[in-house]
Image: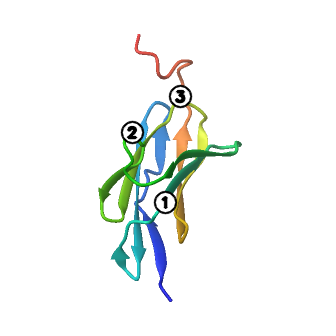
């Protein structure tokens, strides 16, 4: 029987509204990096339901998930609102992994304003 696993790179502990968080995951079978048939990336913002960022064939043109190498995928998540604890979940048909981070509230009423 094969041993499927997803390892998620550690996310920053605390970020600010307006930051971009890079997340990546490595999918393995018996310790060898392997491309799954389908990759799904979801986020869950504090006090809200899951939001699917991407589900599909890895590295499809225009997809928000980038194939870095065999079994290794990444995505950039813009943090535009909702301070609190966020969870990122990467999964395939065979394995899943998740990790969380905190989004810090801004003292400014429009933290993304440029002027």
Along the polypeptide, which appears first: circle 3 or circle 1? 1
Circle 2: element type:
loop
Q: CA distance from mark 3 to mark 2?
A: 32 Å
Residue 68: where, in percent of width, then height? 30, 55
Location of the C terminus by quadrant is top left
Please tell me in which quadrant of the rendered image residue 29 appears: bottom left
Residue 16: where, in percent of width, then height? 47, 36
Along the polypeptide, which appears first: circle 2 or circle 1? 1
Most extreme residue toward the left is 69
Residue 114: where, in percent of width, then height? 40, 15
Q: Is residue 16 above or below residue 65?
A: above
Q: Is residue 92 above or below residue 79?
A: below
Mark 2 crowdedness (10 Å alpha carbons): few <14, some 14-19, many ≥20: few
Residue drawn at (53%, 18%), measured in percent from left and top?
110
Q: Is residue 82 left or right of residue 69?
A: right
Mark 1 crowdedness (10 Å alpha carbons): few <14, some 14-19, many ≥20: some
Circle 1: element type:
loop
Residue at the disc numbered 1: 38
Mark 3 crowdedness (10 Å alpha carbons): few <14, some 14-19, many ≥20: some
Circle 3: element type:
loop
Residue at the disc numbered 3: 106
Residue at the disc numbered 2: 62
């Amino acid at each position: 029987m094969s041993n499927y696993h997803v390892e998620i790179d550690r996310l920053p502990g605390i970020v600010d509204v307006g930051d971009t968080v890079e997340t990546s995951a490595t999918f393995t079978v018996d310790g060898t990096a392997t491309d799954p048939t389908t990759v799904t990336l979801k986020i869950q913002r504090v006090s809200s339901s899951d939001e699917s960022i991407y589900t599909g064939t890895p590295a499809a043109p225009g997809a928000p998930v980038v194939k870095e190498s065999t079994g290794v995928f990444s995505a950039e998540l813009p943090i535009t609102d909702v301070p609190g604890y966020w969870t990122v979940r990467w999964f395939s048909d065979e394995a899943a992994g998740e990790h969380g981070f905190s989004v810090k509230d801004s003292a400014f009423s429009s933290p993304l304003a440029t002027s």
